Amino acid sequence: LHSNLREWALYSEEEVLAASVLHPLFNTEEHFAAEFWKPTMSQRERLEALSEAVHRTSQALAAVGVPSFLESAGLIGWLRHGQGQLPWDSDGDLGILVEDCIRAGSSKDELQRAAGEELVVLKFACACEEDCVG
């Protein structure tokens, strides 16, 4: 087992959900946007916010004609945890097909309008319009 996985085995699912997002086992620079960071959150609160963001993003994508789907750990969590997320997850996994995106001809600005003011579209492009890393 990876050393982090061995450490997680010492916690119940409820303890993981109650843990602070600052817990060393949640350390993930890959999924960190400082302007949206709330260090006082519990993991349960983070997952609730991520679930809401994934749901609203899926609705916004549908509004601009781009079908989306759960993938990776997001799909596994939905199947294994009663349509929720894996308790230790730190991101939301929503996928789109490039063919659907190109067919819709949607832009980042159109997606932002569909998403509303409560969500911020950091990156979106069917073809590389900007920094396409990440």
Image (cartoon, rainbow, N blue to C red):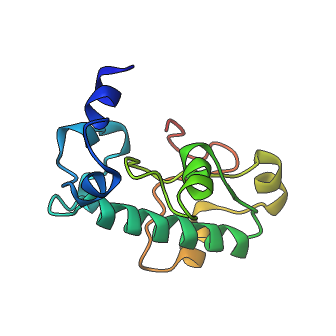
Asked if residue 64 is positioned above or below residue 80 in the image, the reply reads: below
Asked if residue 119 is positioned above or below residue 20 in the image, the reply reads: below
Asked if residue 39 is positioned above or below residue 99 in the image, the reply reads: below
In the rendered image, residue 122, in percent from the top left (x then y), is placed at 45, 56
Camera-side residue of 93 and 24: 24
In the rendered image, residue 68, in percent from the top left (x then y), is placed at 70, 59
Camera-side residue of 30 and 134: 30
At x 29% / y 21%, what residue is drawn?
Answer: 3
14 relative to 92 in the view: left or right = left
In the rendered image, residue 128, in percent from the top left (x then y), is placed at 63, 42
At x 27% / y 42%, what residue is drawn?
Answer: 26
35 relative to 114 in the view: left or right = left
At x 67% / y 67%, what residue is drawn?
Answer: 61
Task: Choose top left, top right, bottom left or bottom right for residue 63.
Answer: bottom right
At x 76% / y 46%, what residue is drawn?
Answer: 98
| The N terminus: image quadrant | top left
Camera-side residue of 121 and 22: 22
In the rendered image, residue 38, in percent from the top left (x then y), is placed at 20, 62
Camera-side residue of 69 and 62: 69
Task: Choose top left, top right, bottom left or bottom right for residue 41.
Answer: bottom left
In the rendered picture of this protein, how many numbered marks are placed on residues?
Answer: 0
